[in-house]
């Protein structure tokens, strides 16, 4: 399992999510979520105190002023369902399975949430052989994975189970849309010629299942909207 610092993941998010995509995304609070401590705030509507913490009593967004904090409810919250496109962060990546934490999505007054993670079965990186010199055949192949922990991923929901959504990144528009270098945490650029991601700082190349829309937040926003149903 790749372990990367939370800070690096947060940086990926900050550098990737442009305003348009941020407007689509929404940090929703769920019942039971900790929104502060009793030391910091007094609870107002939608919040209650428990053992020193303030927790939400409903689905919504935090509100508050004058030392009080609460949660304003959101009425039109629905769950993602198969056929919709989602954006999320890879949280675990092995060769036969990868997990993605799915972000909430807002469309007009409607919000969509994932109350469970997404999983990808046997995700494959882009074909690597066509760019490799012939003499390298038979040598030890690099262990490329479709996703690396911390990657921002656009995926299609193709199934839903009790504990998770089954995702696909097979189509050209889906796959990794933003990533940081595993060595130095700088943003990776898409080198289309090589079919790989290349670090702008240390110049290391990494293979992934890369989306055609890599780094293009406007097109990714359009993709997400196209699959809202
Ligand atoms: Zn680097």
Image (spheres, rainbow, N blue to C red):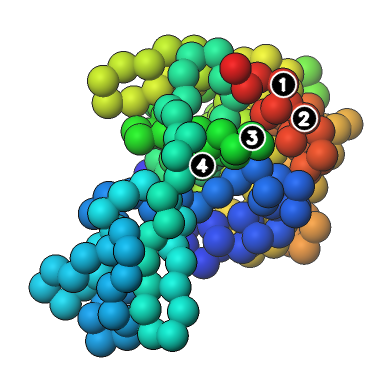
Residues marked 2 and 3 touching at CB (< 8 Å): no
* Mark 4, residue position: 103
Distance of label 1 from label 4 (alpha carbons): 17 Å
Question: Which comes sooner in the sequence, label 3 or label 1?
Answer: 3
Question: Which comes sooner in the sequence, label 1 or label 4?
Answer: 4
Distance of label 2 from label 1 (alpha carbons): 6 Å
Q: Is the residue 15 above or below the residue 114 in the image?
A: below
* Mark 1, residue position: 226
Residue 118 in percent (x, y) is at 42, 29
Residue 177 in percent (x, y) is at 69, 38
Q: Is residue 41 visible?
A: yes
Residue 154 in percent (x, y) is at 62, 31
Distance of label 3 from label 1 (alpha carbons): 11 Å
| Element at label 4 | loop
Residue ID at (26%, 54%): 57
Q: Residues within 10 Å of mark 4 (few under 14, many from 20)?
A: many
Question: Which comes sooner in the sequence, label 4 or label 2?
Answer: 4
* Mark 2, residue position: 222
Residues marked 2 and 1 touching at CB (< 8 Å): yes
Residue at the outermost front position: 45
Question: Which comes sooner in the sequence, label 2 or label 3?
Answer: 3
| Tag nearer the camera, 3 or 1 | 3
Residue ID at (46%, 66%): 63
Residue ID at (72%, 21%): 226
The quarter of the displayed image where residue 190 is located: top right
Distance of label 4 from label 2 (alpha carbons): 16 Å
Residue at the outermost right position: 193
Front-lying residue, 108 or 179: 108
């Amino acid at each position: 399992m790749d372990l990367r610092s939370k800070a690096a993941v947060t940086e990926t998010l900050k550098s990737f999510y442009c305003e348009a995509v941020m407007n689509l995304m929404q940090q929703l609070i769920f019942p039971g979520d900790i929104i502060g401590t009793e030391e910091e705030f007094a609870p107002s509507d939608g919040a209650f105190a428990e053992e020193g913490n303030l927790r939400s009593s409903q689905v919504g967004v935090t509100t508050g002023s004058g030392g009080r904090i609460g949660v304003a409810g959101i009425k039109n919250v629905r769950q993602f369902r198969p056929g919709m496109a989602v954006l999320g962060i890879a949280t675990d990546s092995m060769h036969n399975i990868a997990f993605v934490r799915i972000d909430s999505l807002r469309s007009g007054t409607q919000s969509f949430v994932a109350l469970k993670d997404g999983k990808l079965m046997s995700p494959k990186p882009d074909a690597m052989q066509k760019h490799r010199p012939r003499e390298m055949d038979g040598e030890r192949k690099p262990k490329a994975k479709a996703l690396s922990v911390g990657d921002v991923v656009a995926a299609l929901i193709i199934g839903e189970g009790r504990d998770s959504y089954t995702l696909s990144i097979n189509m050209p528009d889906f796959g990794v849309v933003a990533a940081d270098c595993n060595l130095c945490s700088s943003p990776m650029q898409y080198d289309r010629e090589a079919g790989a991601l290349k670090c702008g700082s240390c110049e290391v190349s990494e293979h992934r299942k890369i989306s055609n829309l890599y780094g293009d937040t406007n097109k990714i926003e359009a993709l997400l909207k196209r699959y809202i149903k």
